[in-house]
Image (cartoon, coloured by chain):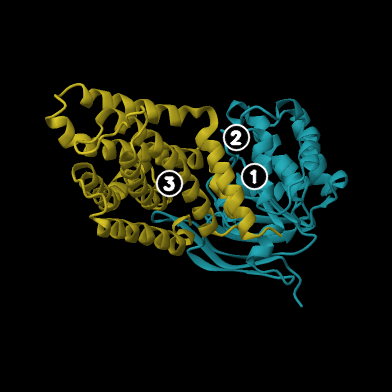
Chain colours: A cyan, B yellow
Amino acid sequence: MDDHYLKFDNLGKQYGYQWAVRSASGKIHPDSYISLFGANGAGKSTLLYLLSGVYRAQEGDLSYGRGLNKKAFHHTMQLMSHQSMLYHRLNAVENLTFFQSLYGEVSAADITKALAYTGLEKHKHKTVDGYSRGMLQRLMLARLLLARPEVVFFDEPFTGLDIRGQKLLLSILENRGVNDFNWKIQSYVFVDHDISRAYEHCEEVWFIDNGSIKEMKPRKDIPLKQIREWLS
Amino acid sequence: MSNPGRVFLSVLKKELHLYFRGTGFFTVSVVFAIGLYFLFRFTYPTDGLTFNVAVSILWAVHLISSIFSLLASQEWEWEKNALRAIKISGADGYINFLGKSIAALITLTILWAVEITAWVFLFGSPHIKIMAPEGFFSSIAWVFLAQVFFTGLIASTGIAFLGQITSVLALHSRFRHVLLFIVFFPLSLPAIITGASYTRLVYTSQDLFSGMHMLTLESAYAFLYIAAGIILYDFLWEE
């Protein structure tokens, strides 16, 4: 049996008359840690939004492995994006309580622990519209910790994070989860504007250009220099 | 795993929290309603135009309050694309639709109760002695009030459910506010006109139980919008 979380065949999505992603195919297996490279407007975010179910593909198919159906896959997956996707008129605790309730039981103790871990404990009763960019990213990180997803799509997750926040996220990427939360990331797809950082934290390199995936290779087969050449 | 019931209750609770947080939306709607009533009540002689337009004012105010609530609800989904996080969780669209619509209905019903109370004090009825000799509403006034409340409740059901359909339809458009009005306004008119006609009938007639067929028609509109939302919402919230 082919052991994969997600398989996508010839995915396509257009904005107006312009195809942002076209004929994208691939699989996400357990223990695959992927960095997705591409120039601005190459279709990286659109591809992640298609894979995470934010967008519906206008072409192609998504199918799920490991005995998962669509709903079960969504319960094992999360997207951490540069868009906060939070309710700005709710405070941190209310946001986390609401989003956690979409997945199952809500534990107030877990929420407190996640807020402490991400350094937001002091701000937990402030409505989110008063948060800085970095604080929003931290709150999304807290949402990830509570959901404990096996598959994560990271779309520019370092946006706005200060040095401490960056260290926190780097440790999650390096350890592939957080032991204190019994969270183990089985697979991720990572998009980052810092090419070296993205290269360091992957085992597989995907390269996307003009909406099509041109390369999918193990990192050892593609030197960083090659990626820089593709992007320049 | 989550279950649909829990997701529904979470969405409902979250929406009510947002509607009543800071009471800004509620205060604006009530002040606006009472302000408009005062304007019409004291501009014209009580036996003239005032009684002729009283019902229209009541319903126009309610329609505008509904639009305020709809805009508020659309705005907090649009601000930071929070709806996307709900999609990522794999929640069914129709559950989100039901939660949001029922929260809107509860909010509109509370507003309607405040609106008709202020309205009945200011406009009374040409045929009903509103105040009892003891100084409170007379028994016939309670029947009248109950009928007006009930027709408003049915119309609000239609408006709340239709509102969520049109809101999500317009959400990702650059002209979302304009598109919302273009789609919502004509579709809401049948429910509003039927509700207003029934209210006018009980307001101007001494037979408080005539015109029940209008309530049936109003209920049919509400049912249509509920069914359309449940069936279509999963398609409408797609991007």
- Across and down, in percent, residue B30 comes to 39, 29
Neighbour tally class for label 3: few under 14, some 14-19, many 20 plus, Cα within 10 Å: many
Residue at 25% x, 45% y: name it: B199
Amino acid at dot 3? Leu
The dot on residue B149 is: none
Q: In which quadrant of the rendered image does the N terminus of chain A lie?
A: bottom right
Q: Which residue is mark 1?
A: A98
Q: Residue furthest top?
A: B42
Total marks in image: 3
- Across and down, in percent, residue B131 comes to 31, 31
Q: Residue furthest front?
A: B133
Q: Which residue is mark 3?
A: B171
* Residue A157 visible somewhere in the drawing: no
Q: Which residue is mark 2?
A: A90
Amino acid at dot 1? Phe
Viewer-nearest of discs 1 and 3: 1
